[in-house]
Amino acid sequence: MSEHTDVTVTWRGLWDETASVIGDRQHARWMCETASSTDPGEFLAGLHQTPMTRMVSHLDAMVARYQTGEPLQYVLGSWSFRRLDLNVDKRVLIPRPETELVAEVAIGLARAIDDERTVVDLGTGSGAIGLACADELPLDGTTVWLTDASSDALDVARANLAGVGRAARNVRVALGNWFAALPDDLEADVIVSNPPYVAVGSVDLEANVGEWEPKGALFAGADGLNDYRVIVPGAIDYLRPDGWLVLEIGYDQGPAVSALFKQQGYRKIEVRRDFAKLDRIVLAKRPA
Ligand SMILES: C[S@@+](CC[C@H](N)C(=O)[O-])C[C@H]1O[C@@H](n2cnc3c(N)ncnc32)[C@H](O)[C@@H]1O
């Protein structure tokens, strides 16, 4: 963008200019809100105000990053997930709207349990699913484990802990390869995961996703099922007798992942769809 030497420039002018430079008025607005540290209401109320120099510098830096193709969410540095505003950067997958449904299913199953409930979010990334569980389940009697094989991702998840306020005391964070992160004697009521599920070489993957988001969060072997092959049998040892396993899946993986559950003897296997009516979740009860 141009140098903003005109001291009379207002946020309205800066928003217009940013929108014309990047070609997206909504994205420009979100960048202006981030640069000005305002919420949507405050931003609109302050459109006539003159930005501080450091805010203009921040906006210019965001625009430059956006113009390289970096995803908006990383440029902004935060993104909303259910009731949370999560820090996100290139160390973690950008939380997707369909994953909010996965969290909703896990929360519903855990909420139905009286007294004490333990939820495990395997491969937590930014902490999205697990922190939403901690945030929305009762403060008393809830324990939520966040695990990941990436210490970089867990640094982001830990930074996001503050966003759940007092519920942070219910959260445990653990590094490791799937179940190796957990204590051997852990008994979970709900294990939930959005594991990597993209087939290597998949033509479905948007170029921008493959370029910017962590490879370790995306790819799971030649057919995208490698991590389900570990998680579905492995969860049995960490679930209570009536515990549930809830997995996010790719739109075309419903039959294959259901078959993995069936092979292991899981009960009440169900495939649920997302907002676009695509298969997105498989859930089932631990084998008897
Ligand atoms: C698709 S991302 C999901 C991130 C987050 N749960 C979400 O829904 O936005 C998958 C996550 O699994 C983690 N992961 C990959 N392989 C793993 C493994 N073997 N053990 C534990 N976590 C793993 C990745 O680092 C990544 O954070």
Image (tube, rainbow, N blue to C red):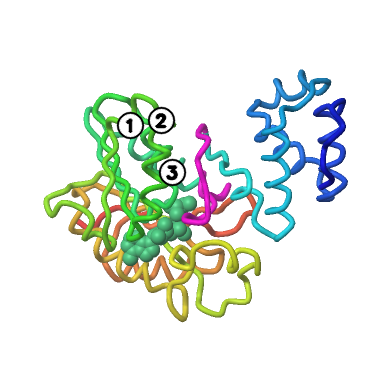
Residue at the spot 22% in from the left edge and 51% down from the top edge: 239
Which-is-in-front pick, marks 3 and 2?
2
The residue that label 2 is drawn on is: 164
Q: Is residue 69 left or right of residue 151?
A: right
Quarter of the image that includes the C terminus: bottom left
Tell me the element at label 2.
Answer: helix
Q: Amino acid at mark 3?
A: Val
Circle 3 residues within 10 Å: few <14, some 14–19, many ≥20: many
Residue at the spot 43% in from the left edge and 37% down from the top edge: 132
Residue at the spot 30% in from the left edge and 52% down from the top edge: 285
Residue 7 sits in quarter: top right
Q: Which label's residue is closer to the chain start, 3 or 2? A: 3
- Residue 87, magenta (yes or no): yes
Q: Which mark is residue 168?
A: 1
- Residue 28: x and y, percent? 77, 41
Q: Amino acid at mark 1?
A: Ala
In depth, the one of 118 and 88 nearer the eye is 88
Q: Do the residues under discs 3 and 2 have CB atoms within 8 angstroms?
A: no
